[in-house]
Image (spheres, rainbow, N blue to C red):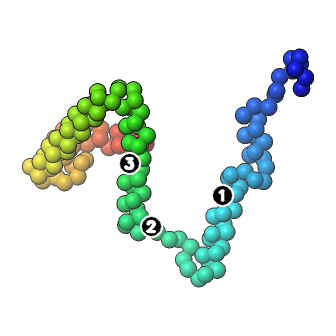
Amino acid sequence: MEPGSTKKNTVSEFSYMLQRQGSDDSAEVNAFDDINSLMKREADKGKSVETLSSLPQASFNYINSIVGSGVIGIPYALHRAGFGLGLFLLVIVATITDYSLILMVRCGHLCGRFSYPGVMEAAYGKGGYYLLSLLQFMYP
């Protein structure tokens, strides 16, 4: 292109993505090829193709997903609120969360229900149970 040219570059990110989807080296094609090759290797070794995670691996993944959101969210919150106020609010929220969990455990012992939906049903009746079930289903 010449410096004085008014012609615009017509390649956009969207057209690049469409072009990549049709090519043989797209991520989706390679991902399925990797899975297929892994399944063939496992089958060739005589091992079962389906392997389940162990309890420590599943626990690590679960904890990692919970901690992962905090790793991103807490520094941003501290940045937006300021270090002093952010740290103060973090301690206040942690204290309120701890106290609410203590109350839920005590309530569970008093009513004889040891699940969160059971405690909600004991405290708020069937309406509370259904509302909690709906909210837990809708939350990603």
The three-letter code of the residue at mark 2 reads Ser
Q: Secondary structure at mark 1?
A: helix
Whether residue 60 appears in this view of the structure is yes
Query: Which badge, 1 or 2, comes first in the chain's sequence?
Result: 1
Q: Secondary structure at mark 2?
A: loop
**Which residue is identified by label 3?**
67
Tell me whether the residue at label 3 lies in contact with that at label 1, contact meaning CB atoms closer than 8 angstroms.
no
Vertically, is 33 above or below 125?
Answer: below
44 vs 111, nearest the viewer: 44
Query: Which badge, 3 or 2, comes first in the chain's sequence?
Result: 2
Where residue 4 appears, x then y in whole percent? Answer: 89, 17
Give the numbered dot on residue 31.
1
40 vs 56, nearest the viewer: 56
Whether residue 111 appears in this view of the structure is no
Give the numbered dot on residue 53.
2
Where residue 49 appears, x then y in whole percent? Answer: 56, 73
40 vs 112, nearest the viewer: 40
Left or right, 125 with reference to 70: left
Quadrant in the picture for residue 57: bottom left
Rate crowding at label 3 as few (under 14), some (14 to 19) or many (20 or more) other CA atoms within 10 Å. few
Where residue 3 appears, x then y in whole percent? Answer: 87, 20
Quadrant in the picture for residue 16: top right
Q: Quadrant of the N terminus?
A: top right
The three-letter code of the residue at mark 1 reads Ala
Viewer-nearest of discs 3 and 1: 3
Tell me whether the residue at label 1 lies in contact with that at label 2, contact meaning CB atoms closer than 8 angstroms.
no
**Residue farthest along the bottom direction in this orientation:** 46
Q: Quadrant of the C terminus?
A: top left
